[in-house]
């Protein structure tokens, strides 16, 4: 991290992307540090504020218009390249213990977050227009991380109209042998699942209700019959080898009954959806709603049936991170500005997020490896604290190794005092799920 965001590397990247072509007081590292500082603030930073910071902090006198002219496509390429280098050169310490999900090389959790952006960005960042959203402009951030190490595996900005299934198709080649892929229904694609299996990797996915399921005899799977059988025997789940789609793709199906209250809520929502479309709910659908349905290509030894639901619950971690990115770093609240400046500032905020998370991960890796409820840091609490520690972070990035380690030690002592994940009563949580796999 020090190497990527150090002055020398920033100048090299700035030169390679054409952002830095001649000597200037506004060097790449000064420009980057200025925006990095601005991104750490709770409020948006105007050009007037930025030029005043340049004057106060670096003694550089610059007009607002001159600074605004520095935001070009080359500037976007510069900060994007820094982001990609930062992702590729992350350290990779185990966060919890070596036994946690040790059967897989990576446990890849991916999701996206979408938000509206100023309409002047609509030519390159079209809004999705779904769910009642009539915005002309929107951005989607695709984010994938490894649950075992906390490393960012993918982080990129696209227009909101590009959906998750398209992303799944276009990134299927990135999956490596013995990886485990956890994604929600938005990414569901049978050809992608087949590609994952061909690469020697594993998937665990929710099953779409409209996908054809066939038993070992090639007959359509009877979920009504399954429900009645489970109800009669008192069992809560079923684990069977089946085929999906008419191409007869072999998968392992896990079907777990949901509580009655959950089922009634599902029925209510589905009835509302069908009523808006002018349709009647199908009998098959009513029985499908009785189950949590998952498909995987992992065998029962690699992934026991009782671990499927707890494992999939880890996917919620990415949703929580998106909530924190918005509430703490306000990635969705940049004010209207020209496109190149807007995208530059968004990339800078993502870089700030990565830096914060990497420091948090480093502190986590230094904690004792025995598993108790006091050994896992709260992402929300630590990010809230770290966001106000900009000068400490910059000291780590810019100092010699000895000083950086000393400052990291100060952060370690600060965070380990009262920044733990809370164990909530009568509710399964991240800590308890980890216990199930260790």
Image: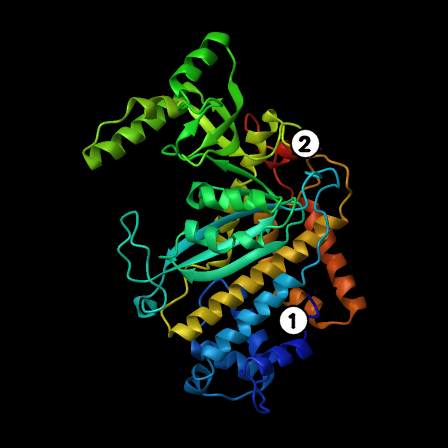
Residue located farthest toward the right when viewing the structure as drawn: 402
Query: Could you classify mark 2 by the number of other residues whose Cα lies within 10 Å: few (under 14), some (14-19), or many (20 or more)?
Result: few
Image height check: is 96 above or below 324? above
Q: Nearer the viewer, residue 62 or 5?
A: 5
Residue located farthest toward the bottom when viewing the structure as drawn: 23
Image height check: is 282 above or below 3? above
Residue drawn where x is 39% and y is 34% of the image = 211
Task: Residue 5: give its label.
Answer: 1
Q: Nearer the viewer, residue 410 or 4?
A: 4
Left or right of residue 50: residue 116: left
Callout 1 touching callout 2 (CB < 8 Å): no
Left or right of residue 171: residue 270: left
Residue located farthest toward the left when viewing the structure as drawn: 278
Residue 282: quarter of image: top left
Q: Nearer the viewer, residue 207 or 37?
A: 207
Q: Position of residue 323 (x, y in %)?
A: 48, 49
Q: Position of residue 332 (x, y in %)?
A: 42, 59
Residue located farthest toward the top when viewing the structure as drawn: 232
Task: Residue 435: give its label.
Answer: 2
Q: Secondary structure at mark 1?
A: loop
Residue 435: quarter of image: top right
Task: Residue 155: give its label.
Answer: none
Rendered-image quadrant of the N terminus:
bottom right
Residue drawn where x is 60% and y is 55% of the image = 152
Q: Please indicate, yes or no, whether residue 320 appears anywhere in the rendered image.
A: no
Residue drawn where x is 49% and y is 31% of the image = 294
Q: Earlier in the sequence, mark 1 or mark 2?
A: 1
Image height check: is 145 above or below 28? above
Q: Please indicate, yes or no, whether residue 241 appears anywhere in the rendered image.
A: yes
């Amino acid at each position: 991290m020090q190497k990527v965001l150090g002055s020398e590397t920033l100048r090299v990247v700035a030169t390679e992307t054409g952002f830095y072509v001649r000597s200037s007081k506004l060097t790449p590292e000064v420009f980057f540090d200025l925006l990095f500082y601005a991104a750490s603030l709770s409020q948006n930073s105007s050009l007037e504020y930025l030029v005043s910071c340049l004057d106060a902090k670096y003694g550089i006198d610059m007009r607002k218009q001159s600074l605004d002219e520095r935001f070009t496509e080359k500037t976007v390429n510069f900060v994007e390249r820094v982001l990609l280098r930062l992702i590729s050169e992350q350290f990779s310490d185990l966060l919890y213990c070596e036994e946690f999900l040790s059967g897989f090389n990576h446990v890849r959790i991916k999701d996206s977050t979408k938000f509206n952006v100023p309409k002047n960005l609509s030519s390159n960042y079209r809004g999705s227009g779904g769910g009642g959203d009539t915005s002309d402009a929107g951005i989607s951030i695709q984010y994938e991380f490894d649950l075992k190490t906390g490393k960012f595996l993918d982080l990129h900005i696209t227009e909101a109209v590009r959906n998750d299934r398209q992303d799944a198709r276009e990134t299927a080649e990135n999956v490596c042998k013995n990886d485990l892929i956890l994604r929600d229904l938005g990414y569901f694609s049978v050809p992608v699942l087949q590609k994952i299996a061909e690469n020697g990797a594993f998937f665990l996915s929710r099953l779409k209700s409209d996908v054809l399921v066939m038993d070992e005899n090639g007959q359509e799977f009877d979920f009504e019959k399954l429900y009645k059988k489970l109800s009669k025997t008192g069992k809560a789940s079923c684990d069977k080898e089946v085929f999906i789609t008419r191409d007869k793709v072999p998968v392992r199906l896990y079907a777990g009954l949901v509580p009655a209250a959950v089922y009634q809520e599902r029925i209510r929502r589905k009835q509302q959806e069908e009523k808006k479309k002018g349709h009647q709910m199908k009998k098959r659908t009513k029985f499908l709603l009785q189950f949590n349905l998952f498909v995987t290509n992992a065998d029962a030894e690699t992934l026991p049936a009782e671990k499927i639901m707890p494992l999939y619950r880890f996917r919620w971690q990415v949703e929580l991170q998106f909530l924190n990115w918005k509430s703490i770093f306000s990635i969705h609240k940049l004010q209207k500005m020209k496109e190149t400046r807007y995208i530059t500032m968004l990339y800078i905020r993502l870089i700030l997020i990565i830096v914060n998370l990497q420091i948090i991960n480093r502190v986590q890796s230094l904690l004792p490896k025995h598993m108790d409820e006091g050994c896992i840091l709260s992402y929300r609490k630590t990010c809230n604290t770290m966001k106000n520690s900009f000068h400490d972070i910059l000291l780590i990035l810019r100092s010699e190794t000895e000083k950086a380690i000393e400052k990291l030690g100060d952060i370690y002592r600060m965070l380990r005092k009262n920044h733990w994940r809370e164990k909530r009563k009568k509710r399964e949580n991240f800590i308890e799920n980890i216990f199930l796999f260790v």
